[in-house]
């Protein structure tokens, strides 16, 4: 088998597993809608609790939206590898000639498409409740786009490490949150800076760099973690 | 000439317990290795360890003369594994599940419809896996083996949940695979009536 064949089968492996997971998500829409609903609920209830003062809402909007997005991503991460572990598909993936890191990347891609991307899409609607101006909403979407990519990738490592444990949710959060802090800080702060009319290039560059960094190591770390968890 | 698949002096521990020590075997094209032993003697553990999911305490497995430990990917390109949990998605249909398999390993190019017909599951194509009986799901796992083009079959308790015809089918399919020059490692309780070159390992 020459290297060209291998790369073709690797990409077909990534596409194949992403396609399968999207199909599964389509057949079980609840798994996708629950975290999204959580995000919308937090963001819709917060203004009711804080009160109708527009200044206060404008000030807290970016922070609340970002925290809600982060928690909603965590909510969906727990089940990333769980069903594969339970029904034996994970074993089948482990003994496939496709590199496990490629399959992990495919699964993470499907996870982002079903959890991160919907957040980005609904965020402008939810941002209305915080009186966010239209010009700022674009930046909110952009930071969420970059941030959720990193969160999906980081989360896949945590989900792989905790897949063999029962009730690993708390541990998963503990593992992921320290690494996710920079995303939250730069994401929320960048949107706040746009709102107050300051420069934002630095924050966006950081988020983009973080996404590239996680993309370069997370699939390999996930693959190694899956092998350990599945012993 | 070295054997296709060889193992020397394998030792495997699970927890504190030593399952076996100094286990060796060699498998050549057309040969069947039968693992026997009572429940809990380590048949499945040995199978998982051959597949590389558990580390041996000691000893090495060689595939085509190269240690599997360092050539995992090429070894995985040569095997298909039927285990107790069949590894299909309950929400996807039979066809969707098998189509995903085509992304995982090389395909034999056998006619899809004919394979399903032979395994008597062609009527179930559009049903989600969750509505299939346990025996029917095992038959789909057999379809995965037939559709992939690999020399080494690992079968862990292939007769579980199958009816009399199903068990005969497994034996026929394995015999055909061996006749084609394939290899098979099978863990089984039942008497296996497969002609040809059969080695036995009894785990205590």
Image: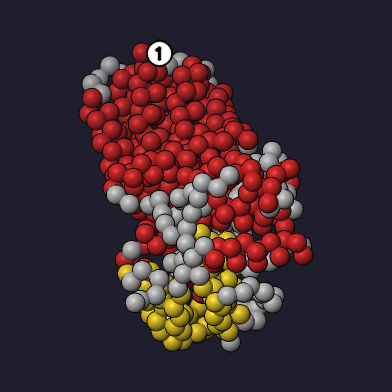
- Above or below: residue A30 compared with residue B149: above
Residue B128 relative to residue A117: left or right = right
Return the residue nearer the eye: A141 or B26: B26
Return the residue nearer the eye: B155 or B108: B108
Residue B164 relative to residue B16: left or right = right
Chain designation of label 1: A
Which secondary structure, mark 1? Answer: loop
- Residue drawn where x is 72% and y is 56% of the image: B134
- Residue drawn where x is 33% and y is 63% of the image: B71
Question: x and y percent of residue A2 in the render?
Answer: 29, 49
* Quadrant assignment, res B179: bottom right
Q: Quadrant of the C terminus of chain B?
A: bottom right
Work out whether residue A80 can be spotted. no
Question: x and y percent of residue A185 in the render?
Answer: 33, 36
Return the residue nearer the eye: B85 or A115: B85
- How busy is the neighbourhood of tag 1: few (under 14 within 10 Å), some, or many (20 plus)? few
Q: Which residue is mark 1?
A: A133
């Amino acid at each position: 088998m020459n290297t060209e064949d291998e790369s073709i089968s690797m990409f077909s492996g990534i596409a194949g597993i992403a396609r399968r997971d999207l199909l599964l998500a389509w057949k079980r829409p609840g798994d996708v809608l629950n975290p999204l609903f959580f995000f919308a609920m937090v963001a819709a209830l917060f203004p009711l609790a804080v009160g109708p003062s527009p200044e206060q809402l404008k000030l807290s909007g970016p922070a609340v939206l970002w925290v809600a997005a982060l928690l909603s991503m965590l909510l969906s991460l727990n089940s990333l590898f769980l069903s594969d572990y339970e029904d034996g598909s994970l074993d089948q993936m482990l003994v496939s000639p496709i590199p496990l890191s490629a399959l992990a990347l495919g699964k993470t891609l499907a996870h982002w498409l079903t959890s991160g991307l919907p957040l980005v899409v609904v965020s402008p609607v939810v941002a209305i409740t915080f009186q966010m101006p239209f010009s700022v909403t674009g930046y909110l979407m952009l930071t969420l786009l970059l941030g959720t990519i990193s969160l999906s990738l980081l989360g896949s490592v945590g989900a792989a490490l905790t897949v063999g444990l029962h009730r690993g949710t708390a541990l998963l959060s503990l593992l992921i949150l320290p690494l996710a802090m920079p995303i939250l800080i730069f994401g929320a702060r960048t949107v706040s800076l746009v709102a107050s009319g300051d420069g934002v290039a630095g924050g966006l560059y950081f988020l983009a760099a973080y996404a590239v960094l996680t993309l370069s190591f997370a699939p390999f770390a996930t693959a190694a973690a899956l092998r350990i968890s599945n012993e | 000439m070295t054997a296709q698949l060889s193992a020397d002096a394998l030792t495997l521990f699970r927890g504190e317990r030593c399952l076996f020590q100094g286990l060796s075997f060699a498998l050549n094209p057309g040969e069947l290795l039968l693992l026997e032993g009572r429940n809990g003697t380590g048949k499945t553990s040995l199978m998982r360890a051959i597949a590389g999911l558990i580390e041996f305490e000691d000893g090495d497995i060689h595939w085509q003369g190269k240690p599997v430990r360092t050539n995992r990917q090429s070894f995985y390109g040569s095997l298909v594994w039927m285990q107790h949990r069949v590894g299909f998605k309950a929400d996807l249909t039979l066809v969707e599940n098998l189509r995903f398999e085509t992304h995982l390993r090389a395909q034999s190019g056998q006619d899809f419809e004919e394979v399903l017909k032979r395994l008597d599951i062609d009527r179930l194509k559009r049903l989600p896996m969750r509505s299939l009986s346990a025996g029917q799901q095992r038959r789909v796992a057999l379809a995965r083996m037939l559709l992939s083009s690999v020399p080494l079959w690992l079968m862990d308790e292939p007769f579980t949940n199958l009816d009399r015809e199903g068990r005969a089918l497994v034996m026929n399919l394995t015999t055909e695979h061996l006749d084609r020059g394939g290899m098979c490692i099978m863990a089984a309780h039942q008497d296996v009536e497969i002609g040809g070159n059969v080695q036995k390992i009894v785990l205590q």
